[in-house]
Image (cartoon, rainbow, N blue to C red):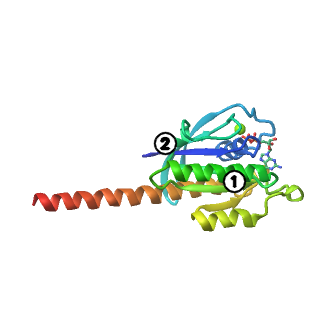
Amino acid sequence: MSRLKIVVLGKGGVGKSSLTLRFIVDKFIEDYDPTIEDHYIKKVLVDGYYSEVDIADTAGQEEYYTIRNNSAQNADGIILVYSITSLNSFEEAIGIIEEIIIIKEKKIPVILVGNKSDLRKEREVPDTYGKKIEEKYKFIFYETSAKYNVYADEIFFEIIREIRKEKNKNNEKIERKEKKKSCIIL
Ligand code: GDP
Ligand code: MG
């Protein structure tokens, strides 16, 4: 079974740990230490196939986040989180997207997540902002609530699907190349 590396990115306080723990232990932990950066390994069944996922819940970045020397460098997929209650966290997410696109020469699946959808009265980021990014970059976009378990698991299932699709495409390319090679030999 292949291990899929997923990295959860985004500004501090947006709910990266809450979403990750929702998926791993199905609990909402109110005050999770914001400085803890941890990995979780879990076997998950998606669409009839098992995958082992390695989820990196990142923490404690500097003012402006850079993925250059980070675990995101060799990730198979990225869950990029902002909070719908913070325009600033959305802007930071856009900055990270631009960086991902510049740095990653190969296409990497990204799911854009607007978390804290339960805090409707404090909304600063209209859902149309996320939808525009979805259209522009062809990323999947969800609004979630880790607190009330709204689409919290789905974002992990979706990134697994996207990573599998990407890996299959790459495998097909390799197969085709090998077929070509064998033609030359024959
Ligand atoms: P991180 O720094 O991105 O890992 O964020 P945390 O997961 O530690 O969450 C930061 C704060 O937001 C904590 O007080 C959480 O309880 C709260 N929080 C996280 N997700 C939600 C959510 O979906 N709804 C609400 N209302 N609060 C949330
Ligand atoms: Mg955290």
- The percent coordinates of residue 81 (x first, y second) are 68, 50
109 with respect to 169 (left or right): right
Which residue is label 2 attached to? 74
Is residue 119 among the parts visible in the rendering? yes
Residue positioned 9% across, 61% down in the render: 186
Residue positioned 68% across, 40% down in the render: 64
160 with respect to 180 (left or right): right
Residue positioned 84% across, 58% down in the render: 123
Ligand 1 within 8 angstroms of badge 1 C-beta? yes
Q: Could you tell me the amino acid type at mark 2?
A: Asn
Q: Which of 98 and 106 is in front in this view?
A: 98
Which of labels 1 and 2 is toward the front?
A: 2
The outermost residue toward the right is 121
Total of numbered circles in the picture? Answer: 2
Q: Could you tell me the amino acid type at mark 1?
A: Ala
Q: Nearer the viewer, residue 23 or 8?
A: 8
Dot 1: what SS?
helix
Which residue is label 1 attached to? 152
Looking at the picture, does residue 98 appear above or below residue 65?
below
162 with respect to 20 (left or right): left
Q: Do the numbered discs 1 and 2 sit on residues whose CB atoms are within 8 Å?
A: no
Classed neighbour count for the residue bearing mark 2: other residues with Cα under 10 Å, few (<14), some (14–19), many (≥20):
few
Is residue 46 among the parts visible in the rendering? no
Query: Distance of mark 1 from mark 2, alpha carbons?
Result: 24 Å
Ligand 2 within 8 angstroms of badge 2 C-beta? no
- The percent coordinates of residue 25 (x first, y second) are 68, 42
First-in-chain label (1 vs 2): 2
Q: In which quarter of the image is residue 118?
A: bottom right
Looking at the picture, does residue 93 appear above or below residue 59?
below
